[in-house]
Image (spheres, rainbow, N blue to C red):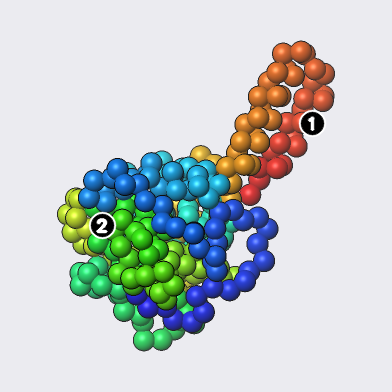
Amino acid sequence: MLVVGAACTSTALAATAGVLPPRNPATDCDRTDTVNAHWGIANINACRALEGIGPLTLPSNWAALTTVAQGFVLMNLERVNRGLPAIIGLSGSLSQLAAGGAANSDDPEFPARGFTGGGGLWAGAASVVAADYMWMYDDGPNGLDPNLACPHAGAPGCWMHRDIILWRRSGALVAGGGFTGSPGDGSFAYLVLDGYSTAGLTFTWKHELQYFAVKPAVDPLAKAAKAHAKHRRKKKRGTRKRPAKKATNKSRSSITITVA
């Protein structure tokens, strides 16, 4: 895995959650009851909860997406639920390079020119969900399925896959993805670049947003719990037949708070 340019920059963000670069988790989030690293959504959600982030909410068209598009959606959910801007889309030219990485079971090559920085990811995993788990939550020195670039604590490759996915850039990020393999045994590769052309995008986050009932946004558990408690209090107040005008005002306020 290779990173070109600065791995992280300090960006002014309105609201963030979880552990963000340059910080990383203190330890890997291993689910040791998992057989042969067949991690799933439940495993990811358990690790997100440890960071104070709510569970993943997948789009309604999830089953119809290609494996590469699913991986892109997962990376963007990991970003936006922590308050980072989404990667704009998948580039056809970058996906060709990523497909080469997947075919060779290695990090994809970078384009010869036309970008200012970025990183490459590869994983051999049972599924694209398991690949996301490995990059985001099992990327430190004591992983259940070890990160080969992190042989010991403090090695430069520790948490680098996670750092690429959660790259804090104020500019537009573009990705490319590749996949080869069979169910239960896949090779997954992605590029995430800054300053690359947005022409020729084959899949965009903007278009995918229509398949979410609620637009994905920063999702700390504390905020979700607070909103749930407030909703319960409002219901109790409603049974006492509070004036309709007051209830309407409170309802408007709660909607305003939840707007991303």
**Kind of element beneath mark 2:** strand
Q: Residue at position x 26%, y 57% from top?
A: 125
Q: Quadrant of the N terminus?
A: bottom left
The residue where tag 1 is placed is 249
Of 59 and 220, nearer the camera is 220
Asked if residue 95 shows in the view, the reply is no
Residue 20: x and y in percent read 55, 62
Q: Mark 1: few, some, or many residues within 10 Å (few <14, many ≥20)?
A: few
**Kind of element beneath mark 1:** helix
Q: Are marks 2 and 1 in contact (CB under 8 Å)?
A: no
Does 80 sit left or right of 33 as displayed?
right
Which of labels 2 and 1 is toward the front? 2
Q: CA distance from mark 2 to mark 1?
A: 50 Å
Which amino acid type corresponds to the residue marked 2 in the rendered image? Answer: Ala
Looking at the image, the residue that sits furthest to the left is 182
Q: Which mark is residue 174?
A: none
Q: Which mark is residue 125?
A: 2
Q: Residue at position x 44%, y 43% from top?
A: 46
| First in residue order: circle 2 vs circle 1 | 2
Which amino acid type corresponds to the residue marked 1 in the rendered image? Answer: Asn
Depicted 18 relative to depicted 89: above or below: above
Depicted 245 relative to depicted 34: above or below: above
Depicted 49 relative to depicted 195: above or below: above
Residue 143: x and y in percent read 34, 59
Does 162 sit left or right of 67 as displayed?
right
Of 74 and 32, nearer the camera is 32
Q: Residue at position x 41%, y 52% from top?
A: 29
Asked if residue 236 shows in the view, the reply is yes
Residue 122: x and y in percent read 31, 67
Residue 21: x and y in percent read 54, 66
Does 193 sit left or right of 11 as displayed?
left
Of 129 and 36, nearer the camera is 36
